[in-house]
Image: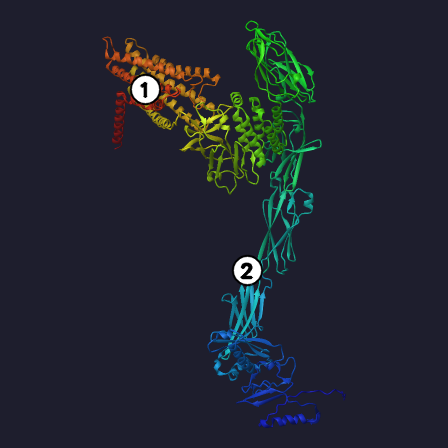
Amino acid sequence: VILFDLPPVDYTVDIEVSLMDSSVLEQVKKYFQNLNLPVSTNISNVEVKISNISVTTVCLPSGDNDSCCSCEDGYAWPSEVCGDLVTCPSVSLESNQTCGYMKGMLSHKHYCEPQTKESCGMGEPIEMQMSVRLDIDFHDDLSNSSSELYKKYKADLETAFNASYRCLPGFVSAAVSGFSPGSVFVNYIVKAAAASFKQISGANKILPQFLDSVYGLNQDTFTTKVTNQTNFIVSPEDIFEGDTVRLICEINSTSENVTWYHHDQVISTHVLNLTDGKTSRSILEIANFTMENSGSYSCSFTNRNHRFHTLIYHDTKTITVSQLTITSSISDDNVICNSPEMQKNSPLLSCCIDKHLPSLTADWKISGEVNMPGVSSLRGNCTEYKLNINESLCPPEKSGTVTTYTCELQTGHGARSSENIQVRYLWAAHVTIPSKVNSVSEGHEFSITCESDVSNYDKISWKIQSGNKTAEVDCGTCVENTRNPARSVLTVKRATQKWNGTYTCTFFQRYLNSSANASINVIPLPLQQNILIDPIVASVRCKVPQTLQCCISATTREDYRVTFVVQEKEFKYAQRKNRKAFCYMYNYTETECGKEKNFTAYCKFVNSIGQEVKSRSITLNPISGKTKQVSCSDRFGIGTEGGILVKPCCELNRCTNGFTQGSKTYKCSKKVWKPQRDDCLSVLMNNLLSHAESLVDDPERNKILPAYLEDLKKTMRENQTEINTSANLGAIIDVVGMASIIPAEAQHTTIENFLSIVDYIAENSTDNAWKDLNEGEGPGSSSLMKSIENFTLNLQPVNNTIPTVSVNTLQLQGIAVTENNTDYNKTFCSTKNLTVDVFIANTEVQTLTQNSTIVSVMYSKLGAILPRNKTQYVNGLLITTTVSGNRSQKIDVNMIFKKENPSLKGPQCVFWNFSLNEPRGAWDTQGCTATWEEGDHVSCSCNHLTSFSILMSPDIKGTIIEDYITYIGLAISILSLATCVIIESLVWKYVTNNTTSYMRHVCILNIATSLLIADIWFVVTASINDQQMNKGICFVATFFIHLFYLCVFFWMLSLGLILFYRLVFILHNTSKTAQKAVAFCLGYGCPFVIAVVTIAVTLPRKSYTRENVCWLNWEDSKALLAFVIPALVIVVMNLFITAVVIIKILRPTIGDRSSRQEKKSLLQIGKSVAILTPLLGLTWGFGLATVVKSSNRAFHILFSLLNALQGLFILVFGTLWDKKIQEALLKRNSLSKWSSQQTKVGSL
């Protein structure tokens, strides 16, 4: 037997001692306390030592089968029975009284245990928000915590609450937090350990015994709100817009009544409630969560299993939602496809969010013309896309296009977001200059073409490097750029040494630039205007040498090959040099002594590359000894009496200030050459003209222009008397014209300088200078106005504005067209208080392209110096309106002018037509109408753009009545003539059954046809004026009108002669063919000869047509007589024939052999001639009266009326009045009806 010495085992034994008499309870407790322990005893032969006996639980009877149990000091109920403890009904208000709990007498299974942290009521106390209703009226004092009533209610209620709830496990306190109306709701907080529903209900049940009944406590209204016993779960933790969010509330008790709130608003949908035996769960699911869904969410479980208590488990969560914000980045958003470096280190695209999400997924999409792929990857909260650059996927024609890479990130809960990353694919351009031009001569035109394989460029620049100087080409229109193909063409109209050097053409594309180079060597060659010839016009004697000279500046280093060309024959020169010039001379001797016709000579300069320039021609007048004698002979030259000699402005050895443009004209008078005309420029004007020519040919002319205008203005202000000759005036106008074609920024100073220069010209020039200039061969004052128009057209807006600038006699206003423009409405006022308003409607302004300009310039003096009609005057301001850019339609410009002289009548709205009287121009009314006249104001409307004004005539009024008569009458006449031709063709075979009748109708038909064609051409001339066609069409129209109106008269003469022949030469028979041949020769041949001769005589003097009308000239060449004289002669002859016919018909002879039918025909002819001839004659008789100056207006109206209705007269008196035609028409009509009836019968 093995014996183990085991240690003793300690046992704790619960022994329940039941006493029938509770009075001995205290004696038993004292007995156990007085025992001398430990005590040993033997139980079932086992030695037992009792070390301690303690009374833990005392239960006293309380009603049937119940007892009220309490724990002794140091002992507490175990936690597993804590929820089943029910306060005994006999609870005392005494706070030191031990709380007893009801326990069934037959179910004593648990007893009090030594008190520990896990014992009932020993845990952390919780706050229970509770309320109860008092069925009494609410007083306002209960809202004031400092009122006596509030304090009394609070003290009484808190006493009762502490007495009632003190036996709850772990009770700490009960305090009133406030009162609210609705009877009186008492809100209070009970702080205790977790208490069961039954325990709280029990405490509520005994509350009335501790409170005065006057409070009207309603025991059915006890409510407890527990806020920390709900498990509230939100999934996912990080919520983004678009996510599906699940809210889960769970409690450790059963409840079927669950309510969800969002900002105190009840949620009734998307809720799932689950309950098992011990717990309750409610799930709220919200799909596609948005910002509006964020905020406070609450769930409430409500239990009401007892009348004394309603328990609410409540919890609240504040949910925030954020956008799924993606931060994108790219290492380089400009990709050069054909860059090896870029292909090696291709760009990396990335998209990131600011939080790490385990379920994050990513997707990449490509959109664009260049579909460049890559490889995607996902790292943490970022997705990356590595491009694979392949230059074959982005050809040059797609350079500059943008491809959009879209990264889309998803959270795994439904939220998704995308971000676009734009990548611009570029192609490094390959630029070439294929032009083969290496050398060009001064004064010659050349062009350089620069090409690129990339059409989507931003800009193109040209630079010229010559030595250490680099100049950027800034010459406006000299560079023309195109995109398809990508090309830039630099065109230089006249090369100078400033264009010599190495050209660099650069195509800019974003930050890339690609260039190509080419060298141009400008070889010296004198310009024609810089070659001085002497003489300019001279006389030459047979076999007497005449010295011819050509000189150029001595500054050139080129060795030219110079020849003189006389009558197409080349001769070598002899060179002579002075200080400032190279002069080339040749002594020409004329060997043909009988020559009398003038001939020309010139010198030709050829440089090293074979390019040449010819000087201006030298005119040589041969002097024949047989017919002319030399009167003047000196160092100037020889000449006959009255002969002309033209020399350069200074003799070659006396040109101290260099070559001066112009010439001096001498006339041989009494054996002496006397000055007749001096067209030489002053030194100042000569220099200004040279500088202007240099500016126009400068590569940087746009850049230089503002400073040039500043200097020119200063020079003009200091030398105002220099423009008192026509030569100087013409020169300064040429200077302004050259400056006007250069584009200029619309800076106030630049515009003011230009207008001031024009103002100085208009103010300080003399009337004689303008008269001489306008009578010369050039455009004269018209050129100055054209220059102003060019300047306004070339103005470049600055910040989309055109400043308003005023000088003495000019004012400029304008706008740059933008999306916000309304109408164009400008008012101008001169120093003489004359005004003009310019208006263009908004609808028309909006048809212009963006950045177009509308600019108006007012002139108060320029109108007076323009050429004008002697009887008409510019009676107001002159206004120029120009529109830059392309226009798809005409623009109506409305203007209101104030008259300078209100007494003048007959206003005409006119514009300056530069194409009339080329190159001078003239006022024109076409396209401009006067819409109204009121007092001293006239309103004009024009459908084109240029310089406008109003002309007034002191003695001629408007012609609107004549216009209406003419247009209405012509319409009637053309319809009548067409009807006449149709009727003649219908009845021809019925009315031409004898020779007389045949020839009569031949004449009538040709009269109608000729007049119809003439009237149609008359209408054409009206349309020509409306459309501002050129003078060539007007010339042709005048010829045909003249021709066919003459044909009308000559066919009338043929008609009269046939009548005369048939009645006077009775016994003579001529064949129909012969008569017809004579009639056609007379009717068309004679008019054609007269019309052609008229052109041949008047055309060399440019006096065939009138100035403003497409008809024969009267004032200058009297060409109108080529129509009037034949017409009047024919009228007189027809009147004579008519008189003879009438006498013959009234006194027939015995020998007459005309049949009765022919007599009727002859009688009809006589009637027709008697009526038609006076009408035609009177018409043109009144027409002759209208060309006489100051003729009565009645002649104008009568001429318009009779001339317009000629066709009607021919139809009535020549056709419809003829009885044979009437009978033929009736017969043809009856035959037509009979034929129609026969057709109907046949069909039946």
| Residue 1175, disc | 1
Percent x, y of residue 303: 52, 75
Q: Which of marks 2 and 1 is nearer the N terminus?
A: 2
Cα separation, mark 2 vs mark 1, equals 97 Å
Q: 902 or 475, which lies in front?
A: 902
Q: Is residue 447 left or right of residue 871?
A: right
Instruction: Identify which amino acid the numbered label 2 is placed on.
Output: Met
Q: In this view, does 932 lie to the left or right of 451?
A: left
Percent x, y of residue 828: 49, 35
Q: 898 or 869, which lies in front?
A: 898
Q: Can residue 811 be seen in this view?
A: yes
Q: In this view, does 311 lie to the left or right of 434?
A: left
Q: Residue 561 sits in which quadrant?
A: top right
Q: Can residue 890 be seen in this view?
A: no
Seen at 60% across and 24% down, the residue is 685
Q: Name the residue under label 2.
A: 291
Q: Nearer the viewer, mark 2 or mark 1?
A: 1
